[in-house]
Amino acid sequence: MRVALDTNVLAYAEGVNGLSMKKSALELLEALPESTTLVPVQALGELFNLLVKKAARSPAKAHASVLGWRDAFSLIETSAAVMLAALDLAKDHHLGIWDGVILAASAEAGCRLLLSEDLHEGFTWRGVTVVNPFADQKHALFAALLEGRHG
């Protein structure tokens, strides 16, 4: 089962929202199958911006962090088709355009789950279900993934 990561998962792993969330995010990333976990390119751009603006890291340190995530997981490119689908998501489902890009890219890559604390939990679009990986009660698909019962 392919899984995409939203920016907030990476930001938490970088320690942006404190040590407790960093620990939770790192444990989550360790539990995910590396070969089927993907990162939309959009998430890397958002992460860079967040590290510089919110976490007050130098652009050089933020750049190094982004390159580390690029090396850790396969990337999902933002194509013209992804952008057009994101526009539809913004229009039809009232998502922000950049959230739409991440969701559309996840669908284009054949992901079954998009792990995000920021999007609408349980929202499913083109076969991708948005799941909050930090919720107390785990979504059934996410629980199955973590238990290794995925196909």
Image (cartoon, rainbow, N blue to C red):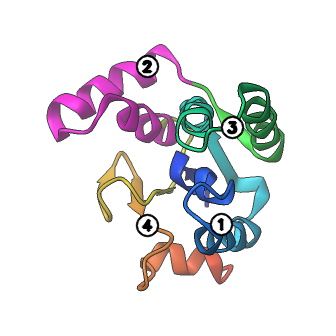
Residue that numbered label 3 is attached to: 57
Residue that numbered label 2 is attached to: 81
Residue at image point 46% right, 57% down:
116
SS at mark 1 in the image: helix
Residue at image point 50% right, 42% down:
106
Foreground tag (2 vs 1): 1
SS at mark 2 in the image: helix
Front in this rendered view, residue 96 or 74: 96
Foreground tag (2 vs 3): 3
Where is the C terminus found, in terms of image quarters? Answer: bottom right
Task: Answer whether residue 91 is magenta in the image.
Answer: yes
Front in this rendered view, residue 124 or 131: 131
Residue that numbered label 4 is attached to: 132
Residue 119 showing in the rendered view: yes
When asked about the image quadrant of residue 78, the answer is: top right
| Residue 111 horizontal/vertical position (percent) | 54, 50
Foreground tag (1 vs 3): 3
Q: CA distance from mark 1 to mark 3?
A: 16 Å
Task: Answer whether residue 108 is magenta in the image.
Answer: no
